[in-house]
Image: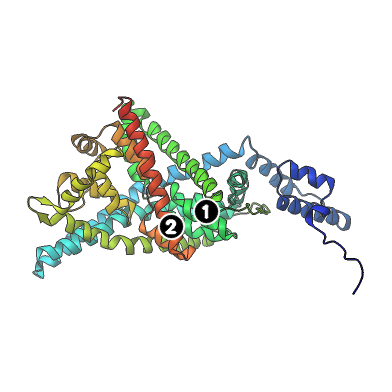
Amino acid sequence: MSGTVKPMTTLATLCTEADKIRLSAGNSLGDIIVTDIYTNAEQIARKVTAHNQSAQSTWDARLDDILTSRLFGYPIMIALLGAIFWLTIEGANVPSGMIADALFAFQDQLTEWFRLAGAPVWLHGVLVLGLYRGLAWVVSVMLPPMAIFFPLFTLLEDLGYLPRVAFNMDRFFQKCKACGKQALTMCMGFGCNAAGVVSCRIIDSPRERIIAILTNNFVPCNGRFPTLIAIATIFVGGSFASEYETIVAALVITLLVLLGIATTYAVSWLLSHTILKGEPSSLVLELPPYRPPQIGAIIYRSLIDRTLFVLKRAVIMAAPAGAITWILGNAYIGDTSILGHLAAWLQPLGYAIGLDGFILLAFILGLPANEIVVPILLMSYLSTGHMIELESLDELRQVLLDHGWTWLTAACTMLFCLLHWPCTTTLLSAYKESGSVKWTFLSFLIPTVIAFAVCFAVAQSARYLGLA
């Protein structure tokens, strides 16, 4: 069969000179195609329809000009998130105290029932002072913040503001070769990292979804905020006059959150240039109209789909932790509990990263739930045999100072709390969402290595310079 063969048409031959200029300017081919599609669709629509711009659409456009601008968009976004954090922290104090009082009062009733049943002391310790007390702590600390944060977050979602957040953050994630929707999963992580991992389902690209899962832990969840707030208030805010103490502590927490976001960008960039190489997918985002929120839908999605779902996983994971911690604190080898022996064994490693053996052990035993790190630490320091809570920050300050805490200990503890491994609930969510042991292990390994490396660098630098 004879004849000429027509050469295959390539994308390069179809590009106009204008397209080539845009490509050379750094625009991706996907962005150019999407832009042209929408431009052509708009031109066709103008030819066949008559469009009278309503006052409502004009108002929406003006508001979008503000919320998505580089000048006002980011400050408004940070202010709104800051307001949500403040409402969550302030609003959770009272209900958290009420739930704790009720649950610990029931603990007294359980103790009475065990006494009447003639149960052995060790069984009461494992089941009541260990398992039940640990669960009560997790529920009382975790439930109120989630019950406030998730409805507020869902409210912004229902109003149509969250797509504007994704639009604002998209250019940063594009530079990291990740997806702009990762901004939404990152915001969800502030409430709970497990919920943030689950929300990665909204990312279509498998590569970018894995990046979002692996980096979600770098934003602090509500389980880590109590530890960060307490240390920041004691060791930073406490250095200022009482009227400025809360403001200074809030600024420290804000800086830590920004550090976590910066770490998210850095690790996302590193992953997308190494084990998860690839080009970022175009975020085709049609900003929805602003609309009044649907209260019923907000309550259902935030409380049923998110709060109770995450709380159930946390309770399942935290239940054994309380029992194991009680056993370690009450089983003795010689004159020292197993808890004390483990802390002594970890002391050299803890000192190298600016902590001590007890602090590092508290983070390890707090793997099932970050909420129990401080209670475990106090239990270890005071040798009480069960998790306790002090009445005030002044009492906590004195206990920490009595056990050798300095500004370096506080700084490294906050950094370690911010960057360290995910809780078991988050790891379980990572496994269910990725379907891979490899990615789940990396979601544990990456923050662990970063936390140890950062704290080691800070501690050794401070000591070398004679600052500690």
Instruction: Looking at the picture, tell me which residue is in the foreground, 446 or 172.
Output: 446
Side (left or right) of 267 relative to 454: right
Q: Is residue 391 among the parts visible in the rendering?
A: no
Q: Amino acid at mark 2?
A: Ala
User: Which residue does the numbered mark 1 point to in the structure image?
Assistant: 275
SS for callout 2: helix
User: Which residue does the numbered mark 2 point to in the structure image?
Assistant: 194
* Foreground label between 1 and 2: 1
Residues at marks 1 and 2, CA–CA distance in whole angstroms: 23 Å
- How packed mark 1 is, by other alpha carbons closer than 10 Å (few <14, some 14-19, many 20 or more), is few
Side (left or right) of 206 relative to 304: right
Instruction: Looking at the picture, tell me which residue is in the foreground, 358 or 6.
Output: 6
| Quarter location, residue 464 | top left
Q: Residue at x 27, y 42 (%)?
A: 350
Say if 229 sits above or below 361 in the image.
Answer: above
SS for callout 1: loop
Give coordinates of residue 451: x percent, y percent.
38, 44
Q: Which mark is residue 300?
A: none
Q: Is residue 287 among the parts visible in the rendering?
A: yes
Q: Amino acid at mark 1?
A: Ile
Q: Residue at x 73, y 40 (%)?
A: 25
Q: Quadrant of the N terminus?
A: bottom right
